Amino acid sequence: MKTFVFVGLLVVLGISDAFAASAGWEDDYRKVLATARQESKHILVNFTGSDSCLPCMKMKANIFSKKEFREFAEQNLVLMEVDFPRKRHLPFHIEIQNQRLAKDFGVVWFPAIFVLSPEGKRLVRYRYMEGGPDRFIATIKKSMRPQVSAKE
């Protein structure tokens, strides 16, 4: 009986951890675009191999999970995770969407992180970045500045 309870507890903790890890991250591209337009927020698209890509895991642990990033993102970004896990299966429609997005965005390695305008225009692409959330946020802010034309 003790073994059953212990195993059950591990399963519940694992499931709750998976849900907590994706908190704030959407997986539906159409929904992300609509939300960004409605809220006038930029979009951060994270192409990841969440359970097999070491730099992806480091990005999540060292930047995306940090309070500074979460607070910045809540105010400024709509977050989308385009995941390609090896140890679990996603719903079929999400797998198809993610494959199409990877092709459309030209993604061949992970992580590939894009910042899009609120209208969905691609502004910049990043890879894993050392330096923690403060450096990442500063870099993202630069890409979010309005583009100044050469005439101004």
Image (cartoon, grey):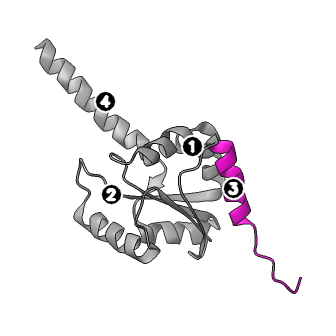
The amino acid pointed to by label 1 is Ile
Marks 3 and 2, the one that precedes in the sequence = 2
Image point (57%, 43%), residue name: 63
Image point (61%, 51%), residue name: 73
Residue 76's quadrant in the figure?
bottom right
Quote the CA–CA distance across marks 1 and 3. 13 Å
Residue under label 1: 63
The amino acid pointed to by label 3 is Thr
Quote the CA–CA distance across marks 3 and 4. 34 Å
Give whichever of 5, 133 is nearer the camera: 133
Q: Look at discs 4 and 1 and give the one toward the viewer.
A: 1
Q: Which mark is residue 84?
A: 2
Q: Which residues are magenta?
A: 133-152
Quote the CA–CA distance across marks 3 and 2. 25 Å
Residue 104 locus on image (x, y percent): 42, 77
Q: Look at discs 3 and 4 and give the one toward the viewer.
A: 3
CB within 8 Å, label 3 to label 2 = no
The amino acid pointed to by label 4 is Leu
Residue 145's quadrant in the figure?
bottom right
Q: Look at discs 4 and 2 and give the one toward the viewer.
A: 2
Q: Which mark is residue 13?
A: 4
Residue under label 3: 139
